[in-house]
Image (spheres, rainbow, N blue to C red):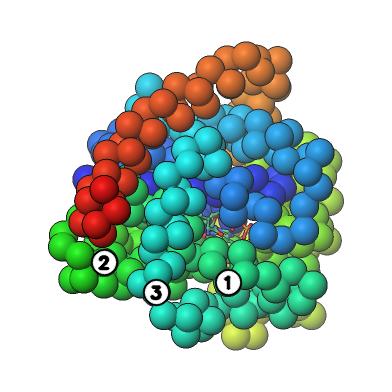
């Protein structure tokens, strides 16, 4: 099977990105042909600082490697370095109804949250994402739940292209983890944990122990005392239980039993210790990689060359079918 996925270099990677996406990528690279991208063209559709973008790209490369991606087992590259992505996005835009783009939840939410950035780029974002996936003829796209709708749209676009011009594209499927597909904010447990929200709402995979502890201890819960999974009435505790369970490998039922009769303080302290320990290997690896910029650039350059070969071959087919060459 072929696998493609990407993350925007728009800030620190958090445990939601890890549990929803990267953890699956690390497993998939063992058995499948995987391409993982740093989608910088997707990062510039909302406010960003040009002087920080290159640093964010390198930080995300470090995060990919620290979390376990192996450049010998998968292709790692930066989206804007393979120009076929924007070229295909343009072509796909010519066969995509405007209404399909306007009904995307991410477009609705982000244009409401940042009305000053409700640009054509934001509206067209899913076309670029579809191009990313279709160029590599990916069967599977491992992502968190928030991206499912974009992958369904990608399927529709691929179907429409194949029907109009002849078969080129594979119809991709979203691959969501069984648990952890939507980790919620620690401060607003009814909202998704997000790297562009306030840092108190997320735990960065490289956060220092003190910070992890502080964020967990101040995570919003409820006025009760019982550590019990109840999404409706206890969204904060339920979210913490999900995270605890995924990092410890213990089921939520077992955790409820373990903390039966103990208050939230003890539960949170246990969780802070677990996360500090679980994330330590990431912090350690990051420190090593920070000093190896040349090595990082080499990985991205090799990834770019490998990705380009695939992307150019698909573009030749696409242009041929569309009568462009
Ligand atoms: P931003 O705040 O910039 O929108 P984000 O935190 O939502 O960032 P993305 O770069 O949009 O992160 O997403 C990267 C990957 O992580 C995607 O596959 C996405 O589905 C997944 N993901 C993001 N947030 C979560 C979350 N809270 N829980 C599970 N998966 C998530
Ligand atoms: N839109 C995604 C990032 C993204 C992506 C992709 C994910 C861009 N291109 C291709 C999977 C496949 C997001 O906001 N997380």
Q: Nearer the viewer, residue 134 or 200?
A: 134
On the question of residue 286 being in view, the answer is yes
Name the spot of residue 204 as percent of width and height, x first: 70, 46
Any mark on residue 4, and which?
none
The residue to which callout 3 is attached is 96
Q: Disc number at residue 161? A: 2
Q: Residue at x 31, y 46 (%)?
A: 315
* Quarter of the image where ligand 1 sits: bottom right
Q: Is residue 192 above or below residue 141?
A: below
Q: Secondary structure at mark 2?
A: helix
Q: Nearer the viewer, residue 138 or 117?
A: 117
Say whether residue 154 is left or right of residue 263: left
How packed mark 3 is, by other alpha carbons closer than 10 Å (few <14, some 14-19, many 20 or more), is some
* Above-or-below relation of 44 to 253: above
- Element under disc 3: loop
**Mark positioned earlier in the residue sequence (2 or 1):** 1
In the image, the residue with mark 1 has its CB under 8 Å from the nearest atom of ligand 2? no
Q: How many dots with numbers?
A: 3
Q: Residues within 10 Å of mark 2 (few under 14, many from 20)?
A: many
Q: Nearer the viewer, residue 135 or 261?
A: 135
Badge 2 or badge 3: first in the primary sequence: 3
The answer to whether residue 280 is seen in the rendering is: no
Q: Quadrant of the N terminus?
A: top left
- Find residue 263 and report its image quarter: bottom right
- Tell me: 6 left or right of 24: right
Residue in the image at 47% along x and 38% along y: 82
Frontmost residue, 281 versus 133:
133
Q: Which residue is mark 1?
A: 123
Q: Disc 2 and disc 3: Cα gap in Å?
A: 9 Å
Please say if 57 is above or below 14: above
Q: Earlier in the sequence, mark 3 or mark 1?
A: 3
Cα separation, mark 3 vs mark 1, equals 12 Å
């Amino acid at each position: 099977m072929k696998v493609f996925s990407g993350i925007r270099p728009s800030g620190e990677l958090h445990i939601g990105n890890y549990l929803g996406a990267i953890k699956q990528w690390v497993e998939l690279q063992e058995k499948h042909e995987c391409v993982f991208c740093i989608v910088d063209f997707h990062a510039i559709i909302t406010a960003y600082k040009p002087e920080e973008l290159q640093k964010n790209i390198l930080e995300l490369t470090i995060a990919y490697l620290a979390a376990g991606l192996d450049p010998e087992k998968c292709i790692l590259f930066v989206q804007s370095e393979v120009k076929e992505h924007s070229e295909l996005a343009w072509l796909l835009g010519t066969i995509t109804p405007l209404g399909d783009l306007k009904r995307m939840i991410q477009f609705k939410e982000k244009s409401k949250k940042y009305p000053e950035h409700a640009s054509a780029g934001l509206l067209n974002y899913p076309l670029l994402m579809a191009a990313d996936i279709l160029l590599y003829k990916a069967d599977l796209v491992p992502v968190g739940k928030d991206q499912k709708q974009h992958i369904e749209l990608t399927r529709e676009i691929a179907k429409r292209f194949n029907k109009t011009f002849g078969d080129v594209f594979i119809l991709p499927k979203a691959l969501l983890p069984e648990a952890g597909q939507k980790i919620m904010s620690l401060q607003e447990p009814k909202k998704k944990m997000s790297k562009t929200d306030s840092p108190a709402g997320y735990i960065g995979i490289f956060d220092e122990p003190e910070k992890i502890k502080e964020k967990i201890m101040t995570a919003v819960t409820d006025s009760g005392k019982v550590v019990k999974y109840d999404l409706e009435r206890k969204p904060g505790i339920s979210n913490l239980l999900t995270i605890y369970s995924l990092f410890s490998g213990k089921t939520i039922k077992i955790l409820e039993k373990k903390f039966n009769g103990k208050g939230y303080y003890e539960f949170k302290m246990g969780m802070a210790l677990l996360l500090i320990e679980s994330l330590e290997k990431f912090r350690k690896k990051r420190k090593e990689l920070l000093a190896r910029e040349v090595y990082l650039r080499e990985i991205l350059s090799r990834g770019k060359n490998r990705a380009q070969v695939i992307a150019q071959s698909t573009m030749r087919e696409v242009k041929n079918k569309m009568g462009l060459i």
